[in-house]
Image (cartoon, helix red, strand yellow):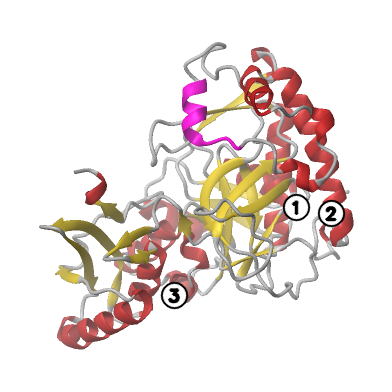
Amino acid sequence: MSAAIKEWSRYWNPIVEALPKEKTRRLQLEKFKRIFAWTYERSKFHRGLYEKAGIRPEHIRSMEDIRRVPTVEKSMMRDIQRKDPFPYGDALCVPLEEVSEFRQTSGTTGQPVYQPDTWQDWEWWAECWSYILWAQGYRPSDRVFLPFGYNVFVAFWAGHYAAEKIGAEVVPGGVLDTQARILKIQELRCTAMMATPTYVLGMADTARKMGIDPGGLTIRRITCAGEPGASIPATKKRMEDAWNAKVFDHAGATEIGAWCFECDAQSGGLHVNEAFFLVEIQDPETGEYIEEPGRRGKMIITALDRMAQPCIRFDSKDMIEWSAEPCPCGRSFRLIKGGVVGRADDITKVKGVLLAPSAIEEVVRSIDGLGDEFEVIVDKVGDIDRITLKIEVVKGREGDRSRIEARLKDQLRLKTNLGYNLEFHEYGKLPRYDVKAKRFKDLRKIH
């Protein structure tokens, strides 16, 4: 169905997005059976994993049976790549000549993982993103600016093709620097863009230095990815205030796909795209599967339609929880409350207290007078944990430092139950990032 014909609909796929829960589960079960059987027959790696666990395709008859299927971790995918066929290894389920797209992970958590896709897989990526963009109000009338470097990382590649698929105009800003990108947005009166939260804030800062008010430009919607910032209220507010635009979150990964999105209702959660993904939440300590709202766990996810290198029960390490309330948009897709709050690897115990970096971001970005950038370093002084928080005071607010510092200490203690060694730096001295930021360092894991 063309974008023009379906303009009346709030949903990209009105049938699937509003399916009753029971029918959605049946659809997911049938799709899981199909991808499991496909992978069992064609992937040497997966078949060995499943045979060792004593599970075959005919054993998958219910959603409960799915939980018997072994999970896969990123480290296992790295090991696979050392085998033939080069460069993907023995998880590949199609002949090499059918691979038409190469991507790799960003390598922020170790050696990059290579991801092959067939043309059918790449169409699937674009369809997943079409659900996202349409839900966030993108329409054929939009002129969408892409301010990211087109690289081997998937980044917003699929967002580019989905914007074209829904009928919008796409302006690629790949090799332009930040100033040139801002001028191109201004010149062409672009109405939407996609970037990491870090870069959205960085672009706004650069625009102001150029004498351009980013809120006076024509950008009216922004889709973020790569970091949890767009689901952190204080960070979302900073971006929306800076650009005078609606900011939407989405989560995805190279080896998984674009699996969830915030819709135009902005209800404080992200919809799982249950037409294409099966998400389970597991307690990282007990291994128990969590169905009820209010309990966080790590995400186990299956991409139900990805064929070249399937993603079946992938342990993403992303920490999420189910929302107790349905979304007012009317979609039956379940909601993740507050989006992805961090990774199980990043949520660490400091002085006996569990600390999530996203909680520090919420505090820093909520305090008027502090800059957008910060760094957190956890180390030890003797046998005692120490947290150093590096921050900047915006220009012109240096005289308010004492008040800002007092409020920062109070809010950090209230929100994280921990004390911090605060380091104030001259505005602009902390590192700036164009893509994923690396603001949290736990040096205790190094020594």
Instruction: Name the residue that disc number 2 marks.
Output: 24
Q: Does the residue at mark 1 contact the one at mark 2 (Cβ under 8 Å)? A: yes
Secondary structure at badge 1 equals: loop
State the image coordinates of residue 416 (x, y, percent, origin top left). 35, 74
Judging depth in this view, the residue of 394 and 266 nearest the camera is: 266
Image-quadrant location for residue 414? bottom left
Q: Is residue 180 left or right of residue 40?
A: left
- Which one is in front in this view, the residue at disc 3 or the one at disc 2? 2
Three-letter code, disc 2: Thr
Residue 266's place in the image compared with 396, above or below, is above
User: Within 10 angstroms of label 2, few (less than 14), some, or many (20 or more) residues?
Assistant: some
Range of residues picked out in magenta: 71-80
Judging depth in this view, the residue of 106 and 241 nearest the camera is: 106
Instruction: Name the residue that disc number 1 marks.
Output: 274
Residue 217's place in the image compared with 78, above or below, is below
Task: Residue at 39%, 54% (x, y): give it.
Answer: 346
